[in-house]
């Protein structure tokens, strides 16, 4: 009876079903967009910035002093590289200092790397937009970020001076020549990080074959816990941290964004709930005489309540399958083509470490929760119309 009642006014029922479907499309699309952004950001953090794991001297990250290094780093790198769960390893020498040119200066982190190893861990070569990087016979080459290059007004081939302290706390200044300019999705990182050859930086810092950081990229994200445990057992004198510990803001972003997306779809369904309530109230007012007749013939209040409840629930749930199918089609389309927002917010996105090309992903794991929210919305929307139906007096209702 409830299902037949829904289709007594087909136009009105189709309108409310369509609105529910479109509301679901909007909510699920936002969830999919957030999931795609977070997946992209997570891949960037792991495969272009911090990697899966990093090894440090336990004292190094407290003060970033050159003396707190990892001795015999190359031996450790080769042993780690031989593990079957490891995809790539890069040893990094790190110094914090000043970059100075004739046109400006800036505080920077100087990272000494071997370009081929670093490319395997952080895709350094792919980020280069000018020059060849740290290759060739040029003395003291340096690769800087595009945002930093624009800030201090230098270009490919320009000369600059780096000033920092060595392991004996002496101030060291050395001239470098720009042989590459890179650009990543993380503009703040580009502005403060420069790359030089590890051999040049080690020589200036008197470190020989030591380094300050060993970045480890794994074959699979699922091997993170096991790999961290194994390396911690093998090198107990070193601090071994995973990407969640190295980039806690990324972990927090993932957790909070999931909550925001659920709140967003909750708001959409709350707005739709008032439309459903309005539709059901109109249906009850149109059928006042009929409802009065049913009650007079012996329909008890529980059956009347269930009748209105089922009409509301079926009306709401009828829109859910269409909403799910349509949202899947829309998300899959944009997952292949991408959404380019660089024309109006590219700089803003890179300022937070996000790409301006977005690829939404269908949130399969959140669909049960979405359906639960839809079900709760249907039940809540049925309460007030049911209450109004129960308040009708049979004799008065039949006179209308």
Image (spheres, grey):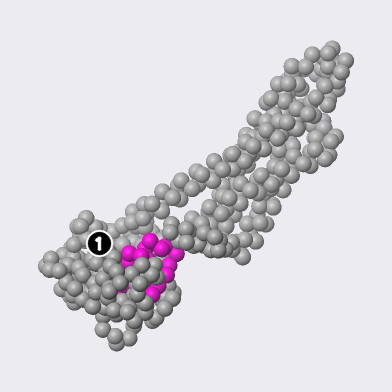
Queried whether the magenta region covers residue 241, the answer comes back as: no
Rendered image quadrant of residue 237? bottom left
Q: From the image, which quarter does the C terminus lie in?
A: top right
Q: Position of residue 111 (x, y in %)?
A: 28, 69
Vertical side of 263 occupied by 29: above or below: below
Above/below status of 130 relative to 147: below
Q: Residue furthest bottom?
A: 137
Element on which disc 1 rests: strand
The residue singled out by tag 1 in the image is 56
- Residue 394 visible (yes or no): yes
The reply, left or right, for residue 18 in relation to residue 58 is right
Residue 61 sits in quarter: bottom left
Whether residue 193 is in magenta: the answer is yes
Query: What residue sits 38% from the left and 61% below the top?
Result: 188
Pointer 1: residues within 10 angstroms few (<14), some, or many (20+)?
many
* Residue 20 found in image quarter: top right
Q: Which residues are magenta?
A: 181-196
Which corner quadrant holds the N terminus? top right
> Left or right: where does residue 28 sit relative to residue 62?
right
Q: Residue at x 29, y 65 (%)?
A: 106
Q: Position of residue 316 (x, y in %)?
A: 71, 38
The x and y percentages for residue 239 are 25, 58
């Amino acid at each position: 009876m409830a299902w037949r009642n829904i289709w007594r006014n087909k136009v009105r029922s189709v309108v409310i079903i369509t609105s529910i479907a479109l509301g679901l499309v909007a909510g699920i699309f936002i969830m999919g967009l957030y999931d795609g952004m977070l997946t992209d950001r997570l891949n960037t953090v792991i495969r272009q910035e911090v990697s899966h794991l990093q090894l440090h001297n336990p004292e190094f990250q407290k003060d970033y002093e050159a003396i707190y290094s990892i001795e015999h780093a190359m031996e450790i790198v080769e042993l780690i590289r031989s593990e079957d769960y490891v995809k790539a390893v890069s040893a990094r020498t790190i110094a914090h200092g000043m970059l100075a040119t004739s046109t400006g200066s800036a505080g920077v982190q100087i990272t000494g790397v071997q370009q081929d190893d670093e490319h395997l861990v952080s895709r350094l070569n792919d980020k280069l937009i000018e020059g060849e990087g740290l290759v060739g016979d040029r003395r003291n080459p340096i690769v800087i970020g595009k945002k930093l290059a624009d800030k201090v007004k230098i270009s490919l081939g320009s000369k600059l001076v780096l000033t920092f302290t060595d392991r004996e706390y002496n101030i060291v200044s050395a001239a470098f020549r720009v042989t590459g300019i890179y650009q990543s999705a993380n503009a703040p990182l580009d502005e403060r990080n420069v790359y030089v050859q590890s051999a040049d930086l080690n020589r200036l810092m008197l470190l020989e074959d030591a380094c300050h950081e060993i970045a480890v990229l794994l074959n699979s994200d699922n091997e993170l816990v096991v790999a961290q445990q194994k390396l911690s057992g093998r090198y107990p004198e070193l601090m071994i941290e995973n990407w969640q510990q190295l980039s806690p803001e990324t972990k927090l972003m993932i957790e909070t964004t999931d909550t925001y997306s659920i709140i967003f779809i909750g708001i959409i369904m709350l707005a739709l709930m008032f439309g459903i309530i309005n539709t059901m109230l109109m249906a009850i007012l149109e059928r006042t005489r009929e409802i009065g007749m049913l009650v007079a013939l012996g329909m008890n209040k529980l059956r009347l309540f269930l009748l209105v409840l089922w009409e509301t629930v079926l009306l709401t749930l009828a829109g859910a399958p269409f909403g799910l199918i349509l949202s899947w089609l829309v998300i899959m389309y944009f997952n292949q083509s991408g959404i380019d927002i660089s024309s109006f917010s590219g700089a803003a996105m890179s300022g937070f470490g996000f790409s301006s090309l977005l690829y939404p992903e269908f949130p399969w794991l959140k669909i049960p929760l979405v359906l639960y929210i839809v079900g709760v919305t249907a039940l809540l929307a049925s309460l007030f119309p049911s209450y109004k139906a129960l308040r009708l007096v049979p004799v008065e209702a039949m006179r209308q």
